[in-house]
Structures are given as C-alpha cells and as structure tokens.
Image (tube, grey):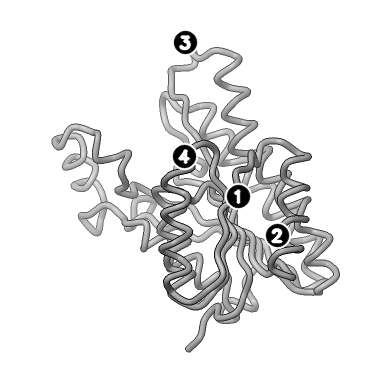
Amino acid sequence: MDLVKGKNVIITGASRGIGKGIALAFAKEGANVAFTYSSSAGPAEELEKELTAHGVKAKAYKSNAADFEAAQDLAAAVVAEFGSIDVLINNAGITKDNLLMRISEEDFDKVIEVNLKSVFNMTKAVQRTMLKQRQGSLIHMSSVVGVKGNAGQANYAASKAGIIGFSKSVALELGSRNIRSNVIAPGFIETEMTEKLPQDVVAQWRAGIPLKRGGTPEDVAHACLFLASDLSAYISGQVLHVDGGMLT
C-alpha cells in the first residue's frame, strides 16, 4: 500500500533526531519532502541527499519557524517548488529545563516561542494552500510532558500542552474543508541527545516503561505516516500517544 506516495510534506526541525527519522520514513514511502533546519547546514545537506536517493524530490530550507514572516516565506517557497502542501509536520522544538524558582523569563519565553508559536506560524502559513486544495493533514509534535507535566520543565510542558489545545481548535475550524489536525505525544525516544545521558539514567527510564524500552525515531515516524495517510481519513482532533504505555 502506498501510504503517502506522491504527497508533498513539510517537516520542521528535521536535520537530526526524530525529525530526521520522520523525513527518511516519508521518503522511503514515496513522499516528496521539504524540511527545515536552524543552523546545521552540513547535516541538512547530507539528509537532502539521503532523501533524494529514494527517488523523491527533497529540499532543505534554512528557516526559523518561530518567525511569523519566515514561516509565510517558507510556505510560499515550498508551493512554488513542489506545487502543493499535503502534509505539515510541526516538529521543531527546544528545551531549557529548570525548576520554576530558577527559570528565567527569557528561557520561558524562548521555549514558548520556538515550540508553540512556531506551530501557529506554520499552520497559519499552510492554511491558505490547504483550504484551496480542500484537503490536508496537520500533525503537531507534543510530548507526554504536555499531558502529565514534569518537574523542572514548566516551560516545556506549557508549550507542549498548548499545542494540544491549538490542534483541537484547528480541527474544529478546518474539518469542513477536509483538513485534519492531530497531535503525536512521544514518550522517551532514544536519539543522539539521549545517548549523552548516563547509562544508569537511561536504564531507569526504560525500566519504568511497560514495553521496557525507549522508543525510536522510527516509532514516531510510523505514527506520522498513519496520520498523514488516508488510513486515518476519519481521524481528527486526536492525541496519539507514542510512549510504550508510559501514561497507561
């Protein structure tokens, strides 16, 4: 089954980690991929080559999704280059963890701007194209932390919880035009970032997960493929937990 063959997809923050895993999964399934990166030009160029090796169209864009005008420019550039936008995956995000008593206003604002405002910016930027097409799938990356909270991550939890409320509202607004809006809430996903953690800490995390392992970028990517494809044609306004049963 060609889940997303021929679809044009935008993925923000895809030069590494979960975003890279999503981009590769979509290219393997025949989707054309436009993806953004903030500063890592080398890895972005390498990924572009990896994606095109699957026989699809792929292009890296240096763009800041937290900047409203930059998001508008990106959407216009992708439509000009690819012809349409069928799927948007809002994946860009950062953390600036600290206890509430120590967190600075600057660190709170920055996380909200990059994680939450970028979702508004990019969704707004692709909305016109999807409305004209009368179809589209919006997929927003939240987190288990956005659902249950986490000590030392008040800013991150607020940003990720905000994404859920935003997505549900958009699902209600755009559903009549066959535009779906859903959220993925990953749990403990093992990437280059988690490799830097002490092994005993990682083992402790794994032990607390019912499936007894951390997730992979591919686990998240497969959920994205489902929500981007016609297999989920009657699913909108939902939060799909990809967490190995953490919140069960």
Q: Residues within 10 Å of mark 4 (few under 14, many from 20)?
A: few
Q: Secondary structure at mark 1?
A: strand
How far apart marks 2 and 3 lie (CA) works out to: 41 Å
Which residue type does callout 4 highlight? Ser
| Residue drawn 50% across the image and 70% down it | 225
Quadrant including the C terminus? bottom left
Q: Earlier in the sequence, mark 2 or mark 3?
A: 2
98, above or below 230, in the image = above
Tag on residue 61?
Answer: 1
Q: Residue beneath label 3, please?
A: 102
182, above or below 73, in the image = below
| Rendering coords of residue 218 (x, y %) | 36, 62
Foreground mark, 2 or 3, reads 2
| Rendering coords of residue 191 (x, y %) | 32, 47
Which residue type does callout 1 highlight? Tyr
How far apart marks 3 and 1 lie (CA) works out to: 35 Å
84, above or below 13, in the image = below
How far apart marks 2 and 1 lie (CA) works out to: 9 Å
Q: Residues within 10 Å of mark 1 (few under 14, many from 20)?
A: some
Q: Secondary structure at mark 4?
A: loop
How far apart marks 1 and 4 lie (CA) works out to: 11 Å
